[in-house]
Amino acid sequence: MKKRIVDGVEFEQSSGNVFADLGLPDAEKLQIKSGLVGEIRNAMRKLELTQEEAARRMGIVQPKVSGMLRGDFSGLSERKLMDCLNRLGYDIEIRVKPAENAIGHLKLAVA
């Protein structure tokens, strides 16, 4: 991260991935999961679903929905979160393209 000083206060500029900034392993996957959960939350709000209703529709138990909405992604793969969004009426497109660097990156883009 880049450091800079503004009015005598040192700041570190974010990389754009808070999980990477915190030094967590699998930061790109965590960012993707976080984005998918954000979309699940938006879908639940739009559809006016309770956690119990959303859980039934997504095929998971309500405590898992509660945990997910609080940031606990344990036991939920990216694939499962995408399945949850599908069950809430959302399409998901995966785009693959050549990377600019030797190693590619994972990225979530929301329409």
Image: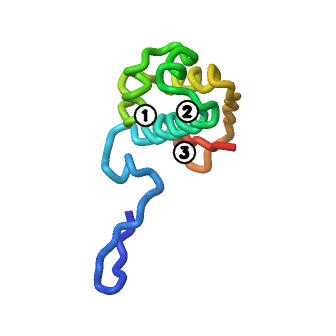
Which residue is located at x 45 percent, y 36 percent?
29
Q: Check whether the beta carbons of the residues at disc 2 and disc 1 lie within 8 A of each other.
A: yes
Q: Identify the residue position indicated by label 3 in the image.
A: 102
Q: Earlier in the sequence, mark 3 or mark 2?
A: 2
Q: In the image, which is nearer the foreground, mark 1 or mark 3?
A: 1
Q: In the rendering, at what x and y percent does residue 88 appear? A: 63, 24
Q: Depth check: 83 or 57 in front?
A: 57
Identify which residue is drawn at 56% across, 49% down. Answer: 101
Determine which residue is flagged by label 2.
40
Camera-nearest residue between 72 and 104: 72
Look at label 3 and name its amino acid: Ala
- What element does badge 2 sit on? helix
Q: Earlier in the sequence, mark 1 or mark 3?
A: 1
Q: Is residue 37 left or right of residue 2?
A: right
Task: Nearest to the eye among marks 3 and 2: give it.
Answer: 2
Label 3 secondary element: loop
